[in-house]
Amino acid sequence: MTSRGESTRLMTTSRGEGAGRRSPRRLPPEAARWLTVDLGSSPVQVVVAGVTGGVGTTTLTAMVARCLAMHRPATRQRPSVVVLDHDGGTAHERSGAPGAGVVAVRASGGGLSSRPSPEDATPAGARGQDRVDADVLLRCLGAQALNPGPTLLDDPTVVAVVVAPWHADGLALAGTAADRLGAYRTVVVPVDVTRAQTSRAGLGLPWDRALTAPGEITERALSAASRRAVIAVSSEVIAAARRVAVLTAG
């Protein structure tokens, strides 16, 4: 364990740099512990869904993908993070795929299924028989967190990231979704989309002008508060994945 006050030196991609050119950035020891933990041989499945549209589900998916890809080593045979956009949005563009260590894939079959599998995705532009594998499969589902019908969220082995506006009504909706999905595997992320957030307490993404711009999200463009928030959310996602692994083993 790293001592108090000491930081772990890890690698992150800087604006304008290719995937092979990295500059060091320090992480808090607890974040470094979670972001680099061994996840085993089976891909961790994470589904990101909003309680409504326009809350930043695509943006959060892209930011978490970049963060995890920066801090989880990829191999020639297996990338660290694969993003699947089931919402037909811009998650691939926002994440900078196929750069920044993130692989973009096309979700087949409409993306709604009660049992997600690595086999239901093919790399963008690849032949149908090609399949993808990764440390983390990160799926953007759009505004489906409160959908009562069968969705990718229904599988008890996936981590559910519920994105909600950062106000009382939004948090209430997120709480409803978490109660239905199971608190042990749900990470609720409030997002300040209207600059109305008054409390800095808890896990959440603050308003950031850089996130309103289209295209790839680069870390240097983000505020320090946004960078810290993304690291915290990404760490919590991995912590939830470990809980799911323990509680669903056997």
Image (spheres, helix red, strand yellow):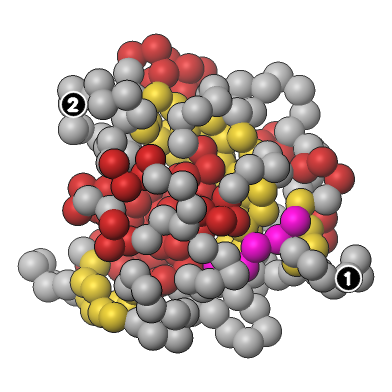
Residue drawn at the location 22% of the way across and 51% of the way down: 223
Kind of residue indicated by mark 1: Arg
Marks 1/2: CA distance?
48 Å
- Viewer can see residue 65: no
Q: Which label number is shown at residue 156?
A: none
The mark lying in front, picked from 1 and 2, is: 1
Name the residue tied to disc 1.
127
Q: Residue furthest left?
A: 5
- Quarter of the image holding residue 145? top right
Q: Is residue 187 left or right of residue 181?
A: left
| Residue 49 sits above or below residue 176 on the image | below
Residue 21 vs residue 76, the one in the foreground = 21
Q: Which residues are magenta?
A: 102-106
- Quarter of the image holding residue 75? bottom right
Name the residue tied to disc 2.
199
Image marks 1 and 2: residues in contact by CB distance under 8 Å: no
- Quarter of the image holding residue 24? bottom left
